[in-house]
Image (cartoon, rainbow, N blue to C red):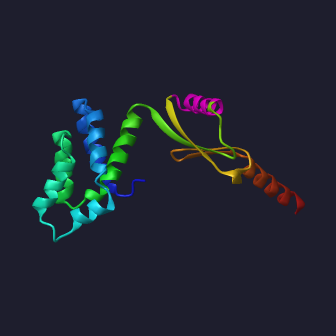
Amino acid sequence: MIQDVAAKRYAEAAYLIARQGGTEAVWLEGLTALAGLGTEEAEVFLQDSQVPAQRKAELLESALKGVDPLVLNLARLLLRRKKTGIAPQIREAFQELLDEANSISHATVTSAVPLSGDELKAVTDKLSGMTGGTVVVKAQVDEAILGGLVVQMGDRLIDGSTSSRLQALKRRLAGVER
């Protein structure tokens, strides 16, 4: 989840540069490599004031060997500003911008039992029809919903679970008894 506002700004700038050059895939690959440096061990090393800036730059350069020079420049900028920890968030925000430009949405579908391949395809097709674009579905199981489906797509929630229907019925019945 993107928590740092700066990460979104860096991602937007990177996306504009990538789109102008037609190098979105190259940037995504480079940002993925940069985000891979987001391990706790690497972050401690990069944030340690005892480690000379030259050694930090050498680590960055060797870890990002072969990436686009502009991605490497972004990595150097993040290092100078002591912001290398937000690299995974920048990559995530960049991916979101790329998906949005390509009309790709992501949805999490929760069911009480695992969905079969055909059921998952039917849900994916229905969601794609609703959005008018491509939907990538991540399925998960939660027995607490009892039945039906709960779909989370961005900030949109579609709750068709048996559990929520029973709760609504309970509220209606409680209101009738008064």
Instruction: Tell me: residue 109, above or below residue 51.
Output: above
Residue at image position (55%, 30%) is: 128
Residue at coordinates 19% horizontally, 60% vertically from top-left? 81
Q: State whether residue 90 is above or below residue 79.
A: above
Count of marks placed on residues: 0
**Residue sitting nearer the eye, 138 or 55:** 55
> What span is in magenta?
118-132
Residue furthest left as drawn: 54
121 falls in the magenta region = yes
Q: Is residue 150 magenta?
A: no
Please provide percent x and percent y for residue 159: 66, 46
Relative vertical location of residue 51 with respect to residue 86 in this rendering, above or below: below
Which percent across, then down, holds residue 52?
A: 12, 65
Q: Residue at x 29, y 59 (%)?
A: 85
* Quadrant of the image containing the C terminus: bottom right
- Identify the residue shown where x is 21% and y is 68%: 48
Residue 95 vs 56, above or below: the answer is above
Left or right, residue 158 beside residue 172: left
Residue at the limit of the structure toward the right, as seen here: 177
Q: Is residue 176 left or right of residue 9?
A: right
The percent coordinates of residue 131 (x first, y second) are 53, 32
Magenta-colored segment: predominant secondary structure: helix
Place residue 124 in its image quadrant. top right
The answer to whether 58 appears left or right of 155 in the picture is left
